[in-house]
Image (cartoon, grey):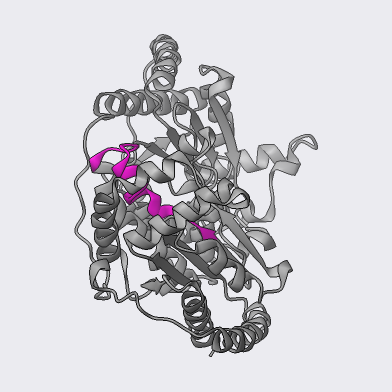
Amino acid sequence: MLTDFVKSIPPEKETMKAELAVEREKLANASMKIKVAKLPVMVIFEGWGSAGKGSVIASVIKNIDPRFFEVATTNAEPTEEEKRKPFLYRYFIEIPEAGKFKFFDTCWMQEVTDGVIDGTLSDKDYERRINSINTTERQLTDNGYLVMKFFFNISKKEQARRLGALLASKNTSWRVDEDDLWENKHYKECQKVYDKYLNDTNRSISPWYIIDAKDKKWAELQVLRFLNQGIDTALKNHSLAVPILQNTFPLKQMPLLKDVALDKTISDDEYKLQLKLLQAKLHELHYKLYRKKIPVIIAYEGWDAAGKGGNIKRIAGALDPRGYVVHPIASPEPHEKARHYLWRFWNRLPKTGHIAIYDRTWYGRVMVERLEGFCSENDWQRAYNEINEFEKELADWGAVVIKFWVHIDNQTQLERFTDRQNTPEKQWKITDEDWRNREKWDLYEGAINEMIQKTSTTYAPWHILESVDKKYARIKALKIVIDAIEKACK
């Protein structure tokens, strides 16, 4: 894209001034339409060092109400804390809210291309990251985001001139670092890497726009033209349904809930013995996975009153409290609801060597949100593949992903609800919503079966915990967690 880039001819000075005024006004008006339409806009600026990204961002944002935009600057080198999270973590948590702009002064491109140039990123890791980026950009656009990507292009000679001018003044010399000088000296080598990245991530849903950045006003006008065109198209297409992708992930065959035998039990004596032994074993394994820097994600879903809380308590009771966290997941807060539904889970991912336990999860998208009408049919149908992609990202990062469905029958739930209702110290556990959900048991069972069948992948399979006997389910969960961690620590 860079090697065959053909520069367009900029307009004359007066024409440029008039067109800038028109495009700036368009953006000002469009920003209010974005707010009303709740369209999130992610604008990514990449390019050569000293190409003028920062100054153009500063000019563009002057046309937008400051309440409705943010500017994010991402360092090429992640912090030590960020290195203990998935590659995409520090970028995904920065995505904008609905109705707002987020301008990125460099995003995920620089970390990838720097890794290629300095030789720290293998070909395999490069391909994996390219796939992650393309998948993420597609997920964002599928979920209503507008993703605009600009690369500021200047020649080697122009870059050298700008770097020299900056270095000539003690007030601006700090803006030039060794990386900028190295980039200019090895311009052709860098151009080849940048060109490959741009081609590999150039997709119709989030194309690259190459900006001739030799002149600041001309660069601004190009950005405004493309940005306004993108906004106009996005506003027109904002409510359109998105094609459902075919699942390409390997699935593990699972039984239907009705075929799961719920008569499994364990004696009190055996339970006490097994609990003590298994918790001691898990306790030791926790230190081992910390030493090996393996992250563990344990996801709990299940029927109301099935015993998720007690099950989680027995897992957590075996762990060093400094190395795990339990996330109780309720209805999304307004700032969470205003972003991609997976955003709040990206924010809750563990560090390497730590364990995150989720009491309810991202699967709410294909259960509660589906059945209660909190998202469109197109949204929840897409979600199966999006969730498989999310969990694949976690597995590729090195995480152990364990998913439990805590299962009981309708009659057992009724008995437990009644007990809660009639026992004063347990009444806080039962709500009118719980009773209402019981009326939709068959609908939920159908949705759960579909969820398990479509998302029980070989890298993140579902495990059904037969929980009519809660003690049996706790022991089974401990054994599954121990087995998964042992395999990962080999």
How far across and how far down the image is residue 256, in percent? Answer: 23, 68
- Is 289 situated left or right of 227 in this image? right
Q: Nearer the viewer, residue 3 or 123?
A: 123
Residue 124: % across, % down: 40, 74
Q: Is residue 368 magenta?
A: yes
Tell me what residue is drawn at x 48 percent, y 42 percent: 431
Q: Residue at x 38, y 62 (%)?
A: 412
Q: In screen coordinates, is 391 left or right of 355?
A: left
Q: Quadrant of residue 348?
A: bottom right
Q: In the image, is residue 128 above or below residue 167?
A: below
Q: Quadrant of residue 231?
A: top left
Residue 118 visible, this orientation: no
Instruction: Please give the range of residues in magenta.
Output: 358-377
Q: Residue at x 51, y 16 (%)?
A: 63
Q: Position of residue 148 (x, y in %)?
A: 39, 37
Q: Is residue 303 above or below residue 392?
A: above
Residue 291 screen position, x and y as percent? 67, 81
Position of 396 compared to 442: left or right? right
Of 290 and 138, the residue lying toward us:
290
Q: Nearer the viewer, residue 313 or 105?
A: 313
* Residue 307 seen by the camera: yes
In the image as oriented, which residue stretches furthest toward the right?
170
